[in-house]
Image (cartoon, rainbow, N blue to C red):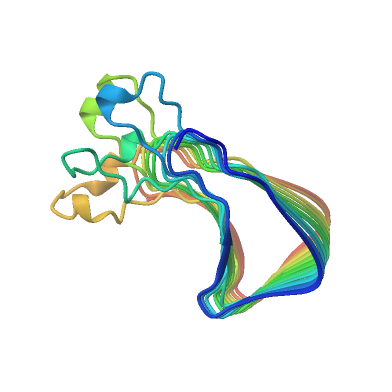
Amino acid sequence: GTGNAGSLSITTESLKIADFSSISSTASKTGNAGSIEITANNILLNNYSEIETFTRFIPDKGKQIGNTAGTGGDLVLDVKTLTITGNSGMELGTWGQGDSGSATIRSDEVILEGSYINGDVYGGGAVDENFQENWQSVTGVGPFISFETKNMSLSGASSIDLTSTGAGDAGMLSIETDFLELTGESKISSKATKTGDGGAVFIDAEKVLLNDGSEIETLTEYIMPPEQGQEGILAGRGGALFLNAKELTISDGSGMELGTSGTGNSGAAMISSDKVTLTGWSYINGDVKPSEVDDFESYNDKWRLVTGNGPDIVFESKEIIINEWSNIDIKTETAGNAGFLSIETDSLALRGISNISSSSS
């Protein structure tokens, strides 16, 4: 309806949300969702359970004037240990024209095991009154998600995701921690797949470890149809990455994907660390690559469709070691230009068939 939802406050020693259960505050029409505030020693989400603060209203085209969509609720967690496991997670984004709320998570330890935190702009499921795909109507902005924690780990293909598949821009992610570890093909992701921009990712840590096929990605991949380009509409830009750490280690096939496979330009990447180590087939790629979108499978020269430019990547470090078939790469295989790579360091070592490269092919 048009009324605003009430706020929810929980104070407890221990909170367990399990077995398809949820705590939610959502906005389905023009009323705003309420806030959720939880203070606890321990919070556990397990077995397909969720905390939700999303908004999803899209007025019919003829009724949009005076029908402003409700905003998503704010989430505040103050907890000593937050554990999310068993395909559980948080849905904090927008499915409509209302903006998302913010999420602030303050915790000594954050553990994600086979779980997710999504702050997406969901255009993929939007349809109009004739049940036609209508991602353009999803104009809400994604959430600002902030973590303040001592230790944070993602394992078992866990993810923190800020993706826009609509016209609204993704939000932002800020992580302040002593130790951040991604392992087991886990991912921190910011993507732009339509006209909304990808979200910026800020990481400030003592130590960052990417291991066992894990990734940080800030990609854009929408190919603008000619009719949209003529209307002055632009493809979404990739989100920027700002990473500040005393030590950054990327190993065992892990890495960063920072480029574009569409007509949108990549976001910039600023990496500041006393010591950067890439080892064991690891990578930092700022590539401009042909699209893998199914819509263009019949197009012979798909590379010509990708006109977005690659990212500017800046390293500031005392020591950089690139070891065991690892690489830092900026290349283009399309009509878009490769980006710019700047490395400022006291010591740079490449060993074991590793490379730094820039190429056009």
Residue drawn where x is 60% and y is 73% of the image: 353
User: Is 33 situated left or right of 59 in this image?
Assistant: right
Q: Is residue 190 left or right of residue 62?
A: right
- Kindly tell me whether residue 341 is visible in this rendering: no
Residue 255 lies, with reference to residue 7, above or below; the image says: below
- Which sits in the foreground, 189 or 42? 42
204 relative to 75 in the view: left or right: right
Please give the name of the residue rendered at 38% of the width and 28% of the height, measured from the top-left corner. 234
**In the rendered image, is residue 258 in sight?**
yes
The one nearer the camera, 244 or 126, is: 126
Q: Quadrant of residue 150?
A: bottom right
On screen, residue 224 above or below 21: above
Q: Position of residue 72 (x, y in %)?
A: 56, 43
Residue 319: x and y in percent read: 83, 60
Residue 48 lies, in percent from the top left, at 51, 75
Of the pair 283 and 57, the residue shown nearer to us: 57
The number of numbered discs placed on residues in the rendered structure image is: 0
Q: Residue at x 51, y 35 (%)?
A: 31
Outermost residue on the left side: it is: 298
Which is more toward the observer, 94 or 185?
Answer: 94
Expressed as whole percent of the image width and height from the top left, the position of residue 354 reads: 61, 69
Image quadrant assignment for residue 224: top left
Task: Describe residue 182's horizontal placement relative to residue 118 as left or right.
Answer: right
Q: Quadrant of the N terminus?
A: top left
Residue at the image position 23 percent from the left and 44 percent from the top = 133
